[in-house]
């Protein structure tokens, strides 16, 4: 259960982590229910297109949600997790809650918060409400999806990209949250594997890494 992201040197035991960790591996205690929220925002790819060859930003967000669901469904550690589609269905059956999981007040978490800070309102109330639907304290909040170009040098893996295009990779900024403590217990960017710009595997590669590292 203590696998590490590439280049990371610190494992964070989420159940007892006293502070926020960044750019390090994290996982939830095995068998713990976790609410996986929809991806909240996306940046255009280099050149102005949307990640995953999506036609719109909204389409890119939902495509990333779908890839995460597919990847997490294969992980034994995530068998008790509530994925975005299940979360939406539960909320639709409880309209009195007045919470939209696709449009949370996430903006204050784009920047890494101080370890001493509690989650602000109205986000705290939104997350507490959604966690209560599944009787859990832990949530995974994907904050921002983006794509970066990987410069090719002598140490880079060789990809046969057409027209001398540079490889790309998708990154997802993620906050892992213990709502009982009103605390962000992990905050960082998770990078996917390098792919050619024409590849259809950009988002799937990222989802596979996230599932492997967070839901062992």
Image (cartoon, helix red, strand yellow):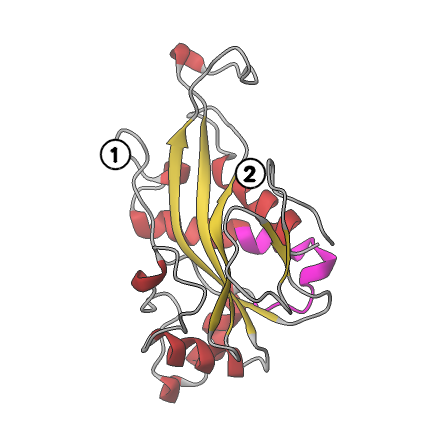
Taking the spot 69% from the left edge, 66% from the top edge, the residue there is 29
Report the label total: 2
**Residue sitting farthest toward the left:** 48
Pointer 1 or 2: first along the chain = 1
Per the rendered image, the range of residues in magenta is 68-82
Q: In the image shown, does 26 or 32 lie closer to the viewer?
A: 26
Q: Pinpoint residue 202: horizontal percent, then vertical percent.
A: 48, 35
Dot 1 falls on a residue whose secondary structure is loop
Report whether 178 appears left or right of 81: left
**Location of the N terminus (image quadrant):** bottom right
Residue 58 located left or right of residue 18: left
Q: Is residue 147 above or below residue 181?
A: above
Identified at 31% across, 69% down, the residue is 105
Label 1 to label 2: alpha-carbon separation: 21 Å
Q: Could you tell me which residue is drawn at 27 percent across and 29 percent down?
A: 47
Counting from the top left corner in percent of width and height, residue 176 is at: 52, 62
Query: Does the magenta segment cover residue 155?
Result: no
Is 173 left or right of 216, judged from the image as shown?
left
User: Which residue is tagged 1?
Assistant: 48
Above or below, 111 relative to 35: above
Residue drawn at the location 54% of the way across and 52% of the way down: 68
The residue under label 2 is 205
Disc 2 element: helix
Mark 2, other Cα within 10 Å: few <14 / some 14–19 / many ≥20: many
Question: For mark 1, does the 10 Å Cα neighbourhood hold few (<14), some (14 to 19), or many (20 or more) residues?
Answer: few
Identify the mark at residue 26; answer none if there is no mark: none
Quadrant including the C terminus: bottom right
Where residue 111 sits in the image (x, y, percent)?
34, 55
Residue 71 visible here: no
Residue 131 is situated, as x and y percent measured from the top left of the image, at 51, 78
Q: Quadrant of residue 40?
A: bottom left
Check contact, mark 1 vs mark 2: CB within 8 A.
no
């Amino acid at each position: 259960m203590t696998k590490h992201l590439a280049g990371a040197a610190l494992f964070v035991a989420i159940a007892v982590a006293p502070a926020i960790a960044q750019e390090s591996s994290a996982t939830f205690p095995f068998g713990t229910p976790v609410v996986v929220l929809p991806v909240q925002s996306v940046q255009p790819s280099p050149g102005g297109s949307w990640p995953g060859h999506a036609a719109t930003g909204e389409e890119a967000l939902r495509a990333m949600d779908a890839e995460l669901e597919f990847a997490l469904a294969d992980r034994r550690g995530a068998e008790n997790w509530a994925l975005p589609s299940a979360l939406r269905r539960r909320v639709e059956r409880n309209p009195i809650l007045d919470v939209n999981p696709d449009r949370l007040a996430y903006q204050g978490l784009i920047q890494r918060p101080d370890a001493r800070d509690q989650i602000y309102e109205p986000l705290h109330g939104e997350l507490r409400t959604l966690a209560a639907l599944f009787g859990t304290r832990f949530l995974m909040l994907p904050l921002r999806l983006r794509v970066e170009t990987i410069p090719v040098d002598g140490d880079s893996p060789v990809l046969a990209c057409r027209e001398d295009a540079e490889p790309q990779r998708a990154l997802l900024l993620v906050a892992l949250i213990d709502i009982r403590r009103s605390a962000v217990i992990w905050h960082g960017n998770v990078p996917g594997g390098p792919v050619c710009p024409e590849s259809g595997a950009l988002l799937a590669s990222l989802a596979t890494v996230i599932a492997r590292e967070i839901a062992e």
